Amino acid sequence: MPQTDIGSPTRLRRLVHAAVLMPIFAALALGGWLVWSKAAELREARQVERSMDLAVALGDVVHEQQRERGASSVYLESAGTQFAEELRDQRRRTDARARDLMAVRSRLDGMLPTAVADSLAAYVEAVTRRSELRARIDALDIPAPDAIGAYTQMNTTALTTIGHLGSASGDGRIAAHAVGFLALLGAKESAGIERAVGAGGFATGRFDDARLMRMGALIARQDSGFDIFRSIGAAPWIATLSEIEASPASRELTQMRAVALDWPRTRSLGGIAAGDFFAAATERIVALKALEETVGTSIAGAAAALVRSATVELTLAALVLIAGIGLSPIAVRRSVRLLEGDVRSVVGAAEEMTAGHLEGPVPYVRLRELVSMRMALESFRQSIREALRREGQLQSERAARIEAEASKAAEIARLEQAASEERARRASAEAAHVAEVAAEVNGIVTAYGEGDFARRIDLAGGDGQLAAICQGMNRIGDSVGAALGAIRKAQDHLAERDLSFRLPDSFNGVFGDIARAMNEANTAMAETVARIGLATSEIDTSIGEIGEAAQGLAERSERNAAVLEETTASLTQMAELISVSTVKSRDAEKLVAEISSRADVGNDTVQKAIAAMETIRSASERIDGVLKVIDDIAFQTNLLALNAGVEAARAGDAGRGFAVVAAEVRALALRSSDASREISEMIASSGVAVQQGVALVNNSGEVFADIVTGVRDTRARIVEIASAATESEATIRHISDATSELDQAIQRNAAMFEETNAAIGTLRTETEALVSQVSAFRLPEGPVRRQSPRAA
């Protein structure tokens, strides 16, 4: 059986592959890009979700450390007499939150960005050194401002870590809310520092200039943070913040602030205790903590929703892509093999028939467009076989008649021979015509196999079965040519970015499947381009909102920088005034030292006078004793003289001289008694005067002692004032330097905000370019244009 090389229909295969594979490859490429972008969105969403878990844990630790800082401030300012038990309880709560943070850190180990991991490691290292700080606080070995600064430094490191977490999201809404969340945390941190500073002031009973300036700066920071939060946060959060600021605790705290700020004028705290200020500030901070948890939960919920959405979209895109990758080669291979096999079968059958092999039937084909060709070939084969059968039968009958009528006349034989020749000639002509038609059919089939569907069979002069076969072949060429032409037109529209073109539904069989597949691919591509356009528009809108927020933040930063510059100038003037006060305090210290020295000399003199008066009092008491003895002697002498007079009277004239002597002795005794009495009275009067003098001198001694003590206390106070003035001068200069640095930092932040605005403008330009590129596609009217990405 002769074989013709019909097994390599290269042009037809390439044409079918091009028609089918080009849209499939385009759809697969678009699907791959979509899967890659959704995977990136999923990774980012999961990173945001993990970041919010860590941010919430850090916020809890910062909140407890704020309370520990406040309790430590009161404990130190009161010299350990207040808040000892509260401080121990608060430390236990802080340690519990720190352990929770360590658990979250261990769970996220290796999954955090480098900046976040480094900042978190620095914070953990600071927490490990917290026990040393606590030991110094327990020993009252650290000033309250230094302790507050140490806690504030730890909290600042934690807030810096949260700031790094907020920049991890590429979602505009989540990133903006993260900035608001960080601003709220910063304002709450300033409120915590204010609680520690204010409670310390109420614990000591005084508010010096440094403390008041610190409180004023902290209040300003809170107001700035709340302004940023209001400009970015959601409406329910802003309403909650307004309720907190209007709460009784906030109003009470505002009144206490007014009392503290007015202390330099009134020198009175109005009976407010450190615990009262601490409780009011804590109640307000607890409310801010509740708002912080609400905001954190909302951002975490948004991140979780973004994760779920990205997961669903990634799963659907991956499934569609996998299905396309898995089914497209099968469908293309099956379609090409089906078309190629049927064409091979038809071409082979035509070649067999051309070679004269008419015994076997035409092979079965599955394509509807080729079924009519097979039926035509089969009918053509049957017609040829029937013609050959009839020809054989006629020849047999003719031979039989020739043999039966051999005796007939020669004329009849001649006429019969002539008729037989005519029939043979006609049969030969018919066979030649059939051969020509078969050759033309073979040429058409060969051309179709090579992808040339423009050729047609000339129907002129044809009739019967051969005409039907030729018509069938021409219909096949028309059908296949129209289908491939429509596919070629669809490819031209796709090349021109026209996704609105659709192939008609009039094709049948494999061409109908191809038309539907191409229409579905164009629809999918149109939906994807529409979703990209809508997503780009949303991105452009978000960029505009972020730009406006960044512009507002830059303007507020510039205003804050101006305020800080004025504050720096005021601090410089205050430092100069405190320096002058320090010099005067030192002069007063020297003067009081001289007064103290003179008071010591006067005190020594008074003490000596007291000793002399005591000696005089003792001598007066001894003289009084001697006078009493003399008075007793005079009394006894008077008795003796009286007895002598009585005895002289009894003796008569003999005792007259003795009576005179006795009278004189009696008179002398009386005079001695009178003199002793006078002297005793004088000594008594002197004793009273001496007692009064001793009392006065003692009082003078006590007064001088009090004066010396007062002078020494005054000297110590003046020394403390001079030292405090020196420290205040250093503190004011430090605050001035810090304020200058803060001013420079705010200036740099303002410049960074300007750069951010420029970057946002560039991003917006790129977004507009992407919108322009997407708008170049012509999309069909209808649901595809209106469909949102989520609905899709």
Image (cartoon, grey):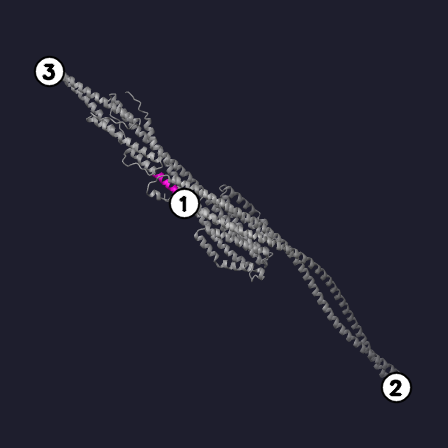
Where is residue 257, by image quadrant?
bottom right
The mark closer to the camera, 1 or 3, is 1
Per the rendered image, the range of residues in magenta is 523-534
Quick one: label 1 or label 3, which is nearer the N terminus?
Answer: 3
Where is residue 76, by image quadrant?
bottom right
Image height check: is 665 above or below 295?
Answer: below
**Horizontal and vertical percent for residue 576?**
62, 54
Q: Which mark is residue 538?
A: 1
Return the residue at label 2: 652
Q: Which image quarter is the N terminus in? A: top left
Q: Secondary structure at mark 2?
A: helix
Q: Is residue 607 magenta?
A: no
Image height check: is 437 above or below 739?
Answer: above
- Is the residue marked by circle 1 packed among few (<14), some (14-19), or many (20+) residues within 10 Å? few
Q: Secondary structure at mark 1?
A: helix
Number of labels in the image equals 3
Quick one: label 2 or label 3, which is nearer the N terminus?
Answer: 3
Return the residue at label 3: 412
Q: Is residue 533 magenta?
A: yes
- Is the residue marked by circle 3 packed among few (<14), some (14-19), or many (20+) residues within 10 Å? few
Q: Marks 2 and 3, how far apart in space?
A: 255 Å
The answer to whether any part of residue 444 appears in the image is yes
Badge 2 amino acid: Gly
Badge 1 amino acid: Glu
Q: Marks 1 and 2, how far apart in space?
A: 157 Å
**Horizontal and vertical percent for residue 155?**
54, 49
The answer to whether any part of residue 303 appears in the image is no
Q: Which image quarter is the C terminus in? A: top left
**Horizontal and vertical percent for residue 633?**
82, 76
